[in-house]
Amino acid sequence: MRPERPQPTVLLELYRTMLLIRRFEERVYFLFLEGEIPGTLHQCQGQEAVATGVCDALEAGDWITSTHRPHGHALAKGVSPRAAMAELYGKETGCCRGRGGSMHLGDPDVGMLPAIAIVGGGNTVVTGLGLAFKLGRTGQVAACFFGEGATNEGAFHEGLNFAAVQQLPVVFVCENNLYGASTPWERVSLVPSVAARAGAYGVTAQVVDGMDVVAVRRAASTAVAAARAGQGPTLLECATYRFVGHSRSDARGYRSRVEEDEWRLRDPIVGLRHQLLEEGAADEAAFDAVGGEVDAVLDDAVEFARSSPDPDPAELLADAYA
């Protein structure tokens, strides 16, 4: 099990990952507005601590499933910024060769199944991964990201129950950002906590501050260790908030600006930065260096995507089975 309080070097790396996700999303937003990126976007600004904390608790050989909002999960699990950016551009060099786009990022080489845009779609697929790991005695763990809206889908209940009964090495990670698209959680559930639903299936569950990367990492480390030890699944409900709309066409009229301002005060990146400064674990020069490194990585990723070739139309039906 990982220590309760990570070393300063680890904390600075967590900061770097969250900053990479945030600035990737900000860069992509403007590229989309300028017409360089096709399709639509579902972004995760504000939720970086969940992806970062969970993926840091996993080993390189562990796997994750993701959602229609996968950019942060992909970068946190190790998908190359170049490959992620090229995929958003629809280029052959993208992580899915330009076939998936924003909602289907993934790379088996780093243990990320291409993201599933169907709400709750990963909640049963992850049990297949977990069952394969159990039967193969590989010692691997699978983590499944999903929103609170997905917990009203049958797939959530089926996946959780099957994983529990089979004692599968799976960690279910609910990113509860309060709204399923534009619908508040309290309008679709009389149960105030997603974690409370786990009791119906005999699954250990915990509510975690999803705006605190250290808290997420600690809870995820415990859940991953339990799964790897053969103790079955855990459900983590990470209370978080997306600073942006559900998608690029969402003006967020269903939320008050007061609510948004209150959550922005809990920005996970700003919070960790303040902690490190107060503890003397890092100084402004260190943060400037990290910021410069992240910007350079993203500059390179954008240039790589722009200069990459489009997919060959002659291969349109390649790898299509239905």
Image (tube, grey):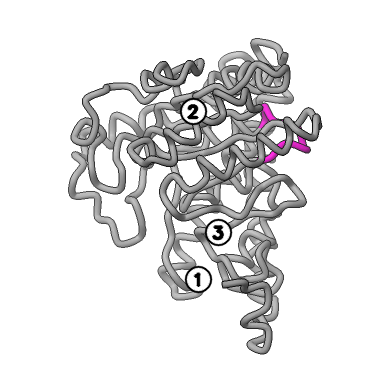
Would residue 202 be found to the left or right of residue 277 on screen? Answer: left
Q: Main secondary structure of the magenta part?
A: loop
| Residue 306 placement (x, y as % from top left) | 63, 75
The stretch of residues the image draws in magenta is 56-63
Look at mark 1 in the image and give the residue it sits on.
37
**Residue pointed to by mark 2:** 161
Label whose residue precedes the other's in the sequence (3 or 1): 1
Circle 3 sits on which residue? 104
At mark 3, the secondary structure is: helix
Look at label 2 and name its amino acid.
Asn
Image-based side of 22 in relation to 250, left or right: right
Q: Are marks 2 and 1 in contact (CB under 8 Å)?
A: no
Q: Amino acid at mark 1?
A: Ile
Residue situated furthest top in the rendering: 4
- Residue depth check, mark 3 versus mark 1: number of the one nearer the observer: 3
- SS under mark 1: loop
Closer to us: 130 or 29: 130
